[in-house]
Amino acid sequence: MIKYIDELQLKGKKVLMRVDFNVPLDDDCNITDDNRIRAALPTINYAIEKGAKLIICSHLGRPKGKRVERYSLKPVAKRLSELLNKEVTLAPDCVGDEVKDLVEKLDEGDVLLLENLRFHEEETKNDPNFSAQLASLADLYINDAFAVSHRAHASVVGVCDHIKECGAGFLMKNELNYFEQALGKPVRPLVAIVGGAKVSSKLGALKNLLDKVDKLIIGGAMANTFLFAQGIDVGASLIEPELKEDALFIIESCKKQGIRLYLPVDCVVAKEIKKDAVTKTVTCLEIPKEWMALDIGPATTTLFKEAIYDAKTIVWNGPMGAFEIEPFSIGTMGLAHAVGSSHALTIIGGGDTAHAIAISGQKKNVSYISTGGGAFLTLLEGKELPGIKALKGCCN
């Protein structure tokens, strides 16, 4: 069992907190979306209120083990200061004597943000010495970075080997609790909607879901491989022919286990993926040879809506088409509205799906939007997150 932050004594302790502040930046290094910072605020504010000497750490971008000023956490420190309405000091690095000096000067309720962890290649290599250096800064470690907890990195896994007390934050608690509600002990019928580009990236999840769901909806470009496996000519659409047998296995498994499998029956096609492309709607049996299926069609949208009508639990990962481009957004938006108006417990996982829900205006109408694409997918595959395993092994 892991402990959560509200089960630990924080007052007067130096608390190292791993968060996910990997926020998007524009060309001038201004934050364009601060949702990831806001998501960590309940845990951060709790630590401050309880008198912790708070040391926050995160990565930003992919500097590949070198100091790249574009990926400095300076804009994050500024935005966090505004949100907390108190000064957040940015350390010049995440390890070293200068950082130790800043930590020793912290008073109860103070906040220090360490510089980008990935300025050191040892972070992604889970280097034991680097882990020990991070751990030496604190008395206690809190992981509130669900989105990176599928990574065996130093600040996520290794640090737990070198610190006496470890726990998880409120964001992590919400993620795990909602996932357990959705797939551990779901109210049925449980419907899983799986979309996106490639079957290969979600094959493990699809196979794991076979033992859990009552209905399985497959859309997006990955549905093309399932149509192809059944002998349907999908024109120039993206397919993974090497996964034909895997697709047939999933189709047959659904039949044997009484799972209702829903695949597209019509689609929006075009010769190229661009805003002003010529499009037409055809049945999936009539896709022209040089055209690509880029969105589910109106009949499929209706079919999928009807499939989730009686759902009590819905888990959705992956869009129904190239929704970022207007001619191919209608199917994903239609399904987003159907999920939003459902009375089911609705869990959204994956960055693209979360973005689709946001632009559809349905964000407030779904039960929970996961902050982690890769981590969410790892859970869907039935695997334990390395970050969670490390917390369980910590010598509390």
Image (tube, rainbow, N blue to C red):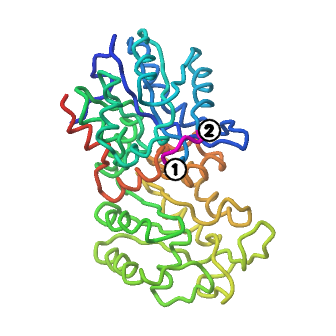
Q: Which residue is mark 1?
A: 342
**How far separated are the C-alphas under marks 2 and 1?**
45 Å
Q: The C terminus is located in which quarter?
A: top left
Which kind of residue does numbered mark 2 sit on?
Glu
Q: Measured along the vertical axis of the image, is residue 333 above or below residue 123?
A: below
Furthest toward the right, the residue is 276
Question: Mark 2 Cα within 10 Å, few/some/many (few <14, many 20+)?
Answer: few
Q: Which residue is mark 2?
A: 69
Residue 67 covered by magenta stretch? yes
Seen from the viewer's position, the closer of residues 50 and 164 is 164
Give how far across and how far down residue 161 sits, in percent: 24, 36
Under circle 2, the secondary element is helix
Give how far across and how far down residue 341 sits, in percent: 56, 48
Judge from the rendering whether residue 151 lies leftward or rightward of residue 359; answer left or right: left
**Span of residues in magenta:** 64-71
Magenta stretch: dominant secondary structure:
loop
Give how far across and how far down residue 33 sits, in percent: 63, 39
